[in-house]
Image (cartoon, rainbow, N blue to C red):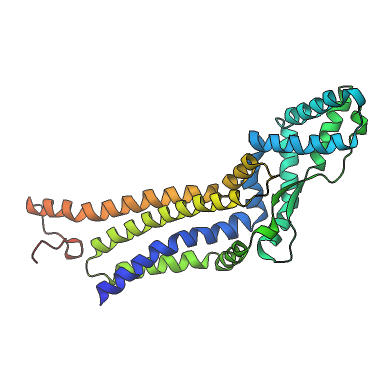
Amino acid sequence: MRSFLSAVLIALVAVLTPLSALAVWADRDIGDTDGYVAAMAPLASDPAVQNAVAVRITDEVMQKIDAGPFQEGVQQLVHEAVISFAGTEAYKTAWNTVNRAAHTAVEDSLTSDSADSVGIDLAPVIEQVKRQLSDEGIPFADQIPVGNTRITVLEADRLGEAREVFDGLQIAGVWLPVATLLLAVTGVLLALHRPRALTGLGLALAAGGLLLRGSVAVGRGLALDDLPPDVDRPAAGAVFDALTSPLRTTSWWLLGAGLALAAGAWLLPHALSRVAAAGAGPVPKALRSPLPGR
């Protein structure tokens, strides 16, 4: 019965490990403003996101400017100005500012059925571009409107069941990882053969890492497939990858640590048995591997 309970608990660890990682991610990375801004910050240098921002700003600006026969030339100037500005530190600062302002709306959209779609207000970026073009003496620069120009990052009406899952993960928070750790320790302590149990625990952690990595990949596919046709898919993919980067890192750590634990727990008793056989002393009973037929 002890061996059976130990096996069941260790098997549960394989299932709860990816859920624990998701719970911490939902609570600390997405639910926390600083964590969210830090996750989104690298996107300021992502070419796909920069291009999506430039296209959105250019389209909005050109709707408000009538440059006559120079319309196409002005459009090209605005687009190039946004791309040029996107490589500056001022753009990175503005990007972090607008994402910090958008975080509350992101969290509301993920936890409330009544929330609207979430967009990033690009007004600070447009203001900087207008100033840059004006300083360069570009005609029509003074006509560029600095209004509420948004780029959508989350479609609230398309979240569906994902909202309930995210809400549950946030509620679980750090308690789920703590419960998973207690199950792992209990499973090892109940085992009649501790090295074998540690080997199983290592394999369970590695399996949990693979499950986590697979879940992220499946979630990415579902998220991008459900996008409206007017959303820039490369930019949306970059946003998803940035937000889930901690999960991918965690999955590789779990896989590596699990395999290392399994290998160590399996090799150590065999190594001690060889040392004992060579006359170096008895092997402690708790670390002794059962021999075939015994």
Relative height, residue 45 to residue 96 (above, below):
above
Residue lying at 7% horizontally and 50% vertically, measured from the top left: 278
In the rendered image, the residue lying farthest to the bottom is: 1
Split into 4 quadrants, where in the image is the N terminus? bottom left
Q: Residue 294 in the image: state x and y as whole percent.
A: 9, 67
Q: Residue 249 in the image: state x and y as whole percent.
A: 48, 47
Q: Residue 131 in the image: state x and y as whole percent.
A: 86, 31
Judge by depth and name the residue closer to the eye, 292 or 114: 114
Q: Quadrant of residue 262?
A: bottom left
Q: Residue 164 in the image: state x and y as whole percent.
A: 60, 66
Judge by depth and name the residue closer to the eye, 71 or 239: 71
Q: Quadrant of residue 52?
A: top right
Residue lying at 33% horizontally and 69% vertically, measured from the top left: 187
Judge by depth and name the residue closer to the eye, 227 or 37: 227
Residue 138 visible in the displayed image: no
Report the number of discs.
Answer: 0
Residue lying at 59% horizontally and 60% vertically, measured from the top left: 27
Relative height, residue 55 to residue 37 (above, below):
above
Judged left or right of residue 289, residue 90 is right
Judged left or right of residue 48, residue 70 is right
Judged left or right of residue 62, residue 38 is left
Q: In which quarter of the image is residue 14?
A: bottom left
Residue 288 visible in the displayed image: yes
Residue lying at 20% horizontally and 61% vertically, measured from the top left: 287
